[in-house]
Image: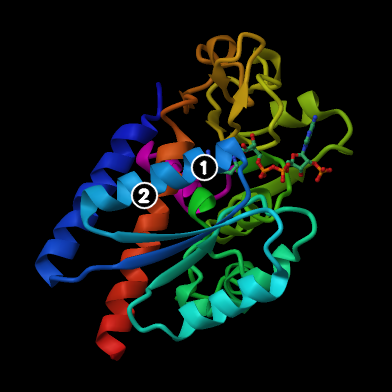
Amino acid sequence: MIIDGKKLAENVRQSLKKIIDEEKIVPVLAVISVGKDKASQIYVRNKEKAAAEIGVKCDVYSFSDDVSQQELENLVLKLNCDKAVNGIIIQQPLPKALDGDALLDLISPQKDVDGFGVFNAGRLLLNEKGGLVAATPKGILRMLESTGETLAGKHAVIIGRSKIVGRPLAALLLNQHCTVTVAHSKTQHLPELCQCADILIAACGQPKIVKKNWVKKGALVLDVGINRDENGKICGDVDFDDVVDVAKFVSPVPGGVGPMTVAMLLENTVQTCLVQTKEN
Ligand code: NDP
């Protein structure tokens, strides 16, 4: 069966719109974008569009590649203090000359709607409630939950250990009582390891690397990758056509994790807006 991330994301957006209308709030998301990376520009536009549809105001701050660290830090500090702003994100990747981690850690934890800062990432790792959880892992968990399968006790193998996907996802699934293995580029015997997975999540940016013989019969397979295949078509890290008959559930690319990531970012923004509105 296919996990329809597009449909799930639409349901999330509809619920958020209802909350926004009922509570009469206008959540504001500040997006800091640096450089002219084409994929990043598309992601920012997608976020703006999805936000506008449900009544979240998206303020995009665009800079050229040569912007200074100081200028960006000043902006983050200003946005932290701005009561009209509920969430702040810094579109990745940043040019190498900039210290992205320092910028992320400067974002107020209450406005860190990407959940990438050390405070929210630490809370997730320690399984402390009330923090902001990174959008992609949060969306993946919702997609897994949508299958109705019990997660506790399952062996989850995650391919990829990045700060934005693999690591927070490992913490999130551990908190759901999965047994978690995180694989990366130095992992040995990857296909055999993946064959042991009840839940297999591919987040390594390698087009269609996961084949049928990597997948245990009846596994749940989630594909995070966004790549181009040899014909320039968008594809995931999973060879969907090869795997679809072996897996019990599989998510497609496009139309899987991507739309859920955007929906979860909006959910985090609405959540922070509700909290901040009550506080002010
Ligand atoms: P990174 O490049 O930051 O991390 C990739 C990870 O995969 C690293 O841990 C790397 O290992 C590992 N890896 C790379 N090649 C292999 C391999 N052959 N075998 C095993 N592990 C490997 O990528 P991101 O986490 O940012 O993104 C991963 C993919 O997900 C990309 O395609 C990206 O576009 C997509 N993405 C999609 C999102 C969505 O919303 N759908 C959101 C975010 C990302 P090592 O650490 O050893 O280098």
Q: 60 or 89: nearer the eye?
A: 60
In the image, residue 93 lies at what x, y percent?
66, 50
- In the visual, does 8 lie left or right of 70? left
Q: Does mark 1's beta carbon lie closer than 8 Å to ligand 1?
A: no
Residue 142, magenta (yes or no): yes
Q: 226 or 159: nearer the eye?
A: 226
Give the quarter of the figure containing the N terminus.
Answer: top left
Look at 55% across and 28% down and name the residue there. 219
Residue behind mark 1? 41
Look at 71% across and 50% down and name the residue there. 162
The CA span between labels 2 and 1 is 11 Å
Residue behind mark 2? 48
Tell me the amino acid under the disc marked 2. Answer: Glu
Instruction: Give SS at disc 1.
Output: helix
- In the visual, does 98 lie left or right of 174? right
Query: Which quadrant of the picture is home to ligand 1?
Result: top right
Compared to residue 213, the image places residue 4 above or below, namely below
Q: Which contiguous range is marked in magenta? A: 138-154
In the image, residue 25 lies at what x, y percent?
19, 71
Please identify the residue farthest to the left as the structure is shown.
Answer: 22
